[in-house]
Amino acid sequence: MTSAQHLPGSASQPAATPSPGPRAVPAVPPQAVPVQGTLDDLGTPLAEVTFVVVDLETTGGSPADCAITEIGAVKVRGGVHLGEFATLVDPGGPVPPFITALTGITTQMVMAAPRIGEVLPSFLEFARGSVLVAHNAPFDIGFLKAACAQLEYAWPSFPVVDTVDLARRVLTRDEVPNHKLGTLARHFRTATEPCHRALADAQATVDVLHGLIERLGSFGVTSLEELKGFAKAPTPEQRRKRHLAENVPSEPGVYLFEDGGGEILYVGKSTDLRTRVRSYFTGSETRWRAREMVGLAQRVRTIVCATGLEAEVRELRLIAEHKPRYNRRSKFPERAIWLKLTAEPFPRLSVVRESRDDGAVYLGPLSSMRQAEEAKAALHEAVPLRQCTQRLTLRLVEKGGGRACALADLGRCGAPCVGDETPEEYGGHAETAGSIMRGDVRPVVRAARRRIARLAEEYRYEEAAAQRDRLAAFVRAAARGQRLAPLARLPQVVAARPAFDGGWELSVVRYGRLAAAGTVPPRAAPRPYVDALIATAETVLPGAGGAPGAMTGAGGTGAEEMECVLRWMDAPGVRLVEVEGEWTCPAYGAESFRGWIDNAYAAVDPSDR
C-alpha cells in the first residue's frame, strides 16, 4: 500500500518551521499595501457618456398590432448637442382619428413617408455605441424591438435609461404631482414644449434628463454604472419594512396592505403570496405609487385561497368593498354602462348606468361611455330609430304635437313624431333593433360593411376608419354581453380543471357568481369532493331583471367576476361536471364576427374601444 503524496503548498502538507537559532525574529503580520484605484474602477463619468434620447409616435399602444408613425432622436454628450434624427414612418395602414387628434399626424402625411424597413437601419446606425434614453422607455423600446424582430434584425444591446424611473426616485410629490413629460418639462423649464410629436418630445426629454442628472449629484451618482443601478435600487423605506413579508405563506391567495389605523391601502392577488409580497420590498418594484404605498403600510394581511380563480374573485370583491386608494381598477363595479332600447310606444336608444326589470332591452355592460356612444351610433346606422329625446305617446302623435328634426329631412328617421310613420311601421324598426341587441347582429355588420366599402372607394379613409370603430365597439359590446348573459341565467354550474400536481381544481358557479372553490388531491375519487363542495357552496339568488341585473355588480362584482370565471373555464382540459339549466349562445351572435374585427385592427390599437 503506497502512501499518498502531498503536493507542495497543499492543505495536507505540514507547514515548514523556521530553523532554531539565537537570533530568531518573531513573525510580523503582513500589512495591507495601499493601492491607487484606476479610472476603470470609478466607472464611466456621465459627462463622457453619449446619450441618444428617442421618442416615437405610433398608431396605438401595443407593438403587437400597432405601428410606428414617427421617430425623433437627439444625440448629446456632456451637455453638448451632437445631432438629431427625425422622420415620419408609413405604418402600412390608416392613422386612427383619435391618434390624429392627439398628434396631428394624418394618414395623408405618412403615405409618402418611408416604411420602417428603410428607417430602422439608419436609426440603429445613429444610435450605435450610445445609451438610449426615453420617457416611459418600455413603450418606445418595445416598439423598436418589435420592429427589429419583424425585420429579422438582431436588437443591439443598448443600455437603456428611463427618465420616468429617475424622476420617481429624484423628485418628491411636493415638487411634481405626477411624472408625465409635460409636467416634468414645466418643472425643469425646458426650451422645447412637448406636443406629442417625436422630435419635439425628444428635445424636451433631453432637458429633463439634464435636470435629473443635476439632481442625481446630491445622491452621489456620477457614473453611468451608478445611474443604471440607481432607479432600480430599493428605497430605504422598502428595505426597512422587509419584515412585513416574513410570515407570508407560499400559497395562492389575496394580500392586503394596511396602514397603522387599519385602513386597507392596496389589495392584490398571487399564486405565490410570499414571492409576490416580498417583491414590494426589493428594487424590482419601481412603481412610484407602490413605493409610496409601502411607505405608509404597517402590516400585510393575507387570505389563503384554494385556487387561483378564488384568489382572483376575492381580490375583485375586496377592492369593490373597500375601494383602496392605491388600487386603480375594479373599484366601482356598480358603475356599469348599458345601451337601452326603451319600453315605450316609440322606443329609442339611450345610454344608462343601471339595468332594471322594466321590459326594456339592454346591451352590455359596456366598458366606457365612449364605447356606448359608438355602439349606439352603429345601431342607428343599421336601423332608422328616432334619435330625439322628446317623449312620444300615441295621443301626442295623433294630435300632431310632435316636432320633426333634421334627421327626418336627411332620410335617417321616419319622423313618427309628425305622423309620417305609423306606429306599426315604427314598431317594425324597434323589433329589428331589439332582435339585434338580443343576439342577431348581422344587420349592423352588413350596414357598416357597405358604408365602409363605399367610403374606401371614395378615398375617405378617415371616415371609413370611424365607421369601423363604431362597428368594433358594437360587436365587442354585444359579444361580451352574449357571453355573460347565459352564465348569469344558470342556477348552477360545476366545473373541474386539471391542477399542476395531478389533482383537480373545482368551482361551483351560481347565477354567474363563484359560490365555492376547492381541490381534489391526486389519485382521489372526485365525486365525494364535488358533493361536499356543492353542499357547502354559497346560496346565490338571481339578479334583479334577470341576466342584466346579475351583471350590475350588486352584491358582488358582476361582469368582471363572470369574465374571470369564463376565462378559467376556457382553459384546456376543463370539464363541466354539472350544468343546471340551458347554456346557449345566439347562432348569429357577435362572437362569430370577433375574428373579422380583430383582423381589421392589424395596425390599430384596440384598447378602450
Image (cartoon, helix red, strand yellow):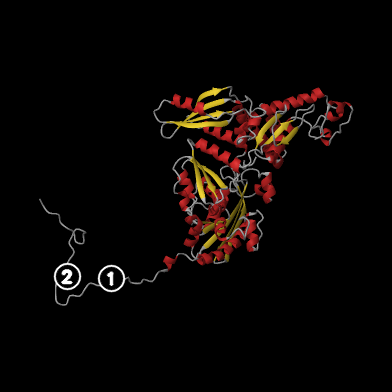
On screen, 568 above or below 329?
A: above
Q: Is residue 173 visible?
A: yes
Q: x, y percentage for residue 591?
A: 61, 30
Residue at image position (61%, 49%) is 114
Please give the name of the residue rendered at 50% of the width and 49% of the height, measured from the top-left corner: 153
Q: Position of residue 87 (x, y in %)?
A: 62, 54
Indicate left or right for 327 with 497 as reference: right
Residue at mark 1: 30
Secondary structure under tag 2 reads loop
Q: Of all residues shown, which one is farthest toward the left?
A: 1
Residue annotated with mark 2 = 18
Kind of residue indicated by mark 1: Pro
Q: Is residue 78 above or below residue 101?
A: below
- Coordinates of residue 364 in the picture (x, y in percent): 66, 33
Percent position (x, y) of residue 331?
A: 61, 42
Q: Determine whether label 2 and label 1 are within 8 Å by CB.
A: no
- Labels 2 and 1: the sequence-earlier one: 2
At horizontal 46% and vertical 49% (from top left) the residue drawn is: 245
Amino acid type at circle 2 is Pro
Q: Which mark is residue 385?
A: none
